[in-house]
Amino acid sequence: MGQSEKIRNVSPHEDRNDYLRVKNGIISITQLKQWARETLPHGSVLSQVLLHQNDSVSTEEFLIKIPIWLKLCDLEGRR
């Protein structure tokens, strides 16, 4: 893939969003934040955490944070 790579939403029901953009070791999570804003409940801890992130993070920072975000998603799904 060229200088800018995309990680696409693989849902068979929706292929219009690119949630992450990677360029030069920096990941833009603006689309992920937009998804959180539009999809998650207003009181969602995951939504609040995502929306307080910078719009771009290093790949290392992303790899550290993703397990935390996934755990929050899992915990909120059990409510």
Image (cartoon, rainbow, N blue to C red):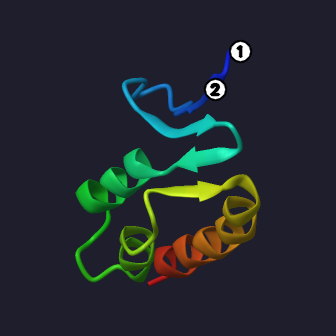
- Residue at (31% x, 52% y) in the render: 34
Q: Quadrant of residue 22?
A: top right
Quarter in which the N terminus is drawn = top right
Give the distance between the C-alpha atoms of the residues marked 2 and 1, in whole angstroms: 6 Å
71 left or right, relative to 40: right
- Residue 52 position within the rendered picture, expressed as x and y whole percent measured from the top left: 39, 75
- Residue at (24% x, 55% y) in the render: 38
Q: Provide the secondary structure element on which disc 1 rests.
A: loop
Residue 1 numbered mark, or none? 1
What's under tag 2, amino acid-wise? Answer: Glu
Residue nearest the viewer, comparing 77 with 49: 49
- Residue 2 position within the rendered picture, expressed as x and y whole percent measured from the top left: 68, 15
Q: As displayed, is residue 58 above or below residue 75?
A: above
Q: Are discs 2 and 1 less than 8 Å apart at CB? A: yes
What's under tag 1, amino acid-wise? Answer: Met
Task: Report which residue position mark 2 lands on.
Answer: 5
